[in-house]
Amino acid sequence: MKKISLLVFVGVYLLTTGVSFAVFDFLGKPQAEEVLVSPEVTSKSKFEALLVGPKDRECPLNGAKFTQKEEELWQARRPLLVMIENHADSRPQSGLSRADVVYEAIAEGAIARFMAVFYCGTAIYSEEGEYDIGPVRSARTYFLDWASEYGDYPLYAHVGGAGQCSDPTVNSKAKALCQLEQYGWKNKGTWSDLDQFSLGFKICRREPDRTGKTVATEHSMYCGTYALWKTAETRGLTNLTLNSKKQNSWDVNFKQWLFKDDSPSGEAVSPEFEFWTDYKDYAVKWEYDAAGNNYKRINGGVSQQDFYTKDYLVAKNIVIQFMKETANVDEHKHLLYQTTGEGKAIVFQDGKAIVGKWIKKDRTSRTRFVDSLGKEIQFNRGQIWLEIVPTTSKVSY
């Protein structure tokens, strides 16, 4: 009897020990599924699923090719133009790598500012709850002249700006906020002006330590492309202007540039310049990369990276526009540029420079670029970056 009891005890002991070991061994080890799956992988897979199929749909803004799914997304919207600053403390910015077109000009002092145009390149990546662009800054009148090229009632996102109509301290030509009203962008039914002060609190938010360093308040506003497009939709501004009598498509008066496929020249011309002399933090170089037939942006001596996407900023086409600049037009030291008429332009693409001129008839007309023989220049398919510099600026290449 004692012998049987001993055998039972030993059996129970071995069984419980084995089960305990198995449980602790299972709980103590990270499971393979948990290691392989991460938010980044899930997100990437989701985007890749939307990119299935041939890239044969042309973006009307820069000629780049996309999938049918991407085209379906952008065709339900209208272009979104966002003021993004380039103060040294604002870098690295978020969202610039996905813009279709970027404009850069001095906003104040020697400090440049961007107006990024979003439509095709960010179509599938625009997600609810994401703050994917910024830091967003204030409006300037000459940027409104370029924004006016993007059809009827373009979506224009900014944080305030220069000059209400009633402000006697601002030069009448520099009153950007007043002009937004005059152009009809703040009217009921065509309210395409997306001033942060008029938006819901979840559309944009302050993130002073977003990049790992704490910055001043003015460098901390970030917005979401998804939320901005949704806001426009609630105002009746999709691809159509729904609250107008005609309900026209945004692009009924939009004029496309001409586009072409890459044709590397074998040259390796890399333009560099300063907006204002001796402000090295804002000096720009576009370094030509023959392998990608594109240009890598170097700003203030540093390769510029998109904080949100982690991609380095590269463009297929660099356009340098020389314009008459008038400084200190009022007590706020606002600037003005002569955006209409014509002037010298240099287009860099395929590793070479094309010297010509820019032509813009009036505020709403599309700026055209022609070579020395008067023939319109075709842009390579991909991001187009327009650099607006004073006529006195020197560009080396």
Image: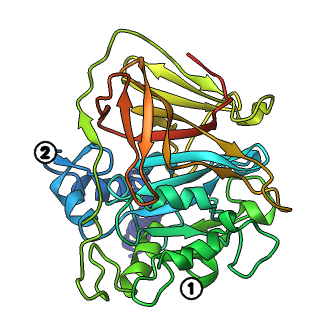
Q: Is residue 167 among the parts visible in the rendering?
A: yes
Q: Amino acid at mark 2?
A: Pro
Q: Quadrant of residue 195?
A: bottom right
> Could you give the CA–CA distance between mark 2 and mark 1, rounded to whole angstroms?
38 Å
Which disc is residue 227 wearing? none
Q: Which residue is mark 2?
A: 54
Q: Tell me if residue 155 comes above or below residue 363 in the rendering.
A: below
SS for dot 2: loop
Q: Quadrant of residue 7?
A: bottom left
Q: What residue do we see at 32% from left, 28% from top?
A: 374
Label 2 vs 1, first from the N-terminus: 2
Give the number of the mark in front: 2 or 1: 1
**x then y, percent, for residue 393:** 67, 29
Q: Which residue is mark 1?
A: 200
Q: Tell me if residue 185 comes above or below residue 136 in the rendering.
A: below
Q: What residue do we see at 56% from left, 81% from top?
A: 202
Q: Residues within 10 Å of mark 2 (few under 14, many from 20)?
A: few
Q: What residue do we see at 45% from left, 76% from top?
A: 192
Q: Nearer the viewer, residue 161 or 129?
A: 161
**x then y, percent, for residue 163:** 71, 72
**x then y, percent, for residue 276:** 74, 34
State the residue lying farthest toward the right. 331
Task: Report whether 347 appears left or right of 310.
Answer: left
SS for dot 1: loop
Q: Amino acid at mark 1?
A: Gly
Which quadrant does the N terminus fall into?
Answer: bottom left
Which quadrant does the C terminus fall into?
Answer: top right
Q: Tell me if residue 3 comes above or below residue 375 in the rendering.
A: below
Q: Nearer the viewer, residue 367 or 157?
A: 367
